[in-house]
Amino acid sequence: MTTSLTLTEVFPPLKNDLILRAARGERTERVPVWLMRQAGRYLPEYGEFKAKHNVGFFEMVKTPSMACEITLQPLRRFNLDAAIIFSDILVIPQVLGMGIDIVEGKGIIFDFLLEKPEDLDKLYKDANVCMDLKYVMDAITLTRHTLNGQCPLFGFAGAPWTLMKFMIDGGSHSPLPKARKWLKVYPEASKTLLNLLCEKTVDYLVGQVKAGAQILQVFDSCAGELGPDAFQEYSLPYLKDIAYRTKEKLMECQVEPVPMVVFAKDAHFALDDLANSGYDVVSLDWTIKPTHARRVVGKHVSLQGNLDPCLLYAPENELKTEVKSMLKKFGTQRYIANLGHGVHKDVNPDNVRMFVDAVHMYSEEINAIS
């Protein structure tokens, strides 16, 4: 029998393991909190850094020292319980051969999109994601060391369906449902693509853990667009495969598996399926009632979320009231506080600080009397 090894001996000891304990269902003295898109464009220092170095988005992602610096910027401002590596879900389509850039004012620009099954032949199916995305691995390792144990570091990837949608539609919004049309017109080609993306995502996540990621999140940002039946066929099986195969491959490498989070936005209809999909944590968008989610998922997984991102525009009293209400509804155990989606680019950082501090303060108060 093999014994799982950990990477703790090569990195500084962890000083704050709240989020890992919450993910595993262990008791926490306060609720851990982090934010999706917590590093980036809403922070003045991010804009200053980008202007100073005169670099584009993917140049920053592909330069480990820059990705590390941007990852750490919010941790200098806020008392966060996790960092998330500065990267993008589209790095997988990039290494498969799609030229992709993010241009200010224009959004995501692809050099080509998948229009018919024959276009799958344009993809580099034999791409070695760990080698081709070594810059992500290097950024993770550098950031783990630079964090000096302050808090855990998230790695992440996009789910196969969401990546497929971007590769066909060119983004998360399209005037025509081209990606969903593929599912009906080209079902076998769709599954071929989803299987390819699943395989590469597993390798990518395993590589991130080997590089130093201590917790992983899989983003299925377009999940709700599928509806219940299509989700069962074209998203859920691949999400499950990613969870089980990632942990299995880590064990085969004698590396201890890390907690895994799944975020299937707008997939309200699949909460029970997600709770039994192999992930330790189910992350919720802001349109789901916390009490309903607790009832549906049961006690064997933790929950994450789900403050409406627009509440970060609210006056201080309203924001704090909503945070307190959210904590009471979720409870303070097996729970990670977060937004129901990413931070909007025009949010005042002071409101982010209020959110983070309110989570800590109110959850400690609730724990003290419970």
Image (cartoon, grey):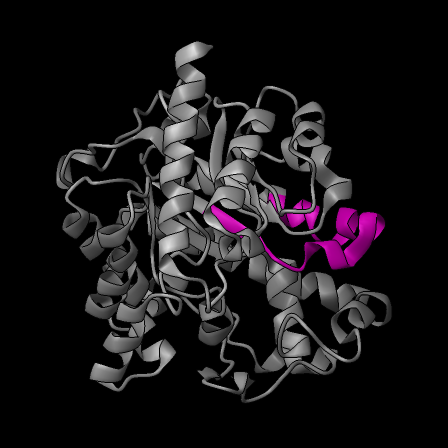
Q: Nearer the viewer, residue 325 or 64?
A: 325
Residue drawn at point x = 37 percent, y = 77 percent: 58
Q: Nearer the viewer, residue 251 or 229?
A: 229
Q: Position of residue 59 (x, y in %)?
A: 31, 79
Q: Where is residue 219 in the image (x, y as percent from the top left)?
A: 55, 54
Residue drawn at point x = 82 percent, y = 47 percent: 228
Outermost residue, top side:
370
What are the residue bounds of the magenta stretch? 217-239
Residue drawn at point x = 47 percent, y = 10 percent: 370
Image height check: is 25 above or below 282? above
Q: Is residue 102 visible?
A: yes
Q: Where is residue 167 in the image (x, y as percent from the top left)?
A: 62, 75
Left or right of 137 in this view: 362: right
Image height check: is 253 above or below 187? above
Q: Where is residue 113 in the image (x, y as percent from the top left)?
A: 63, 83
Q: Which of 132 and 71 is in front in this view?
A: 71
The answer to if 18 sits in the magenta stretch is no
Q: Can residue 257 be seen in this view?
A: no
Image height check: is 38 above or below 42? above
Left or right of 294 in this view: 103: left
Residue drawn at point x = 26 percent, y = 87 percent: 54
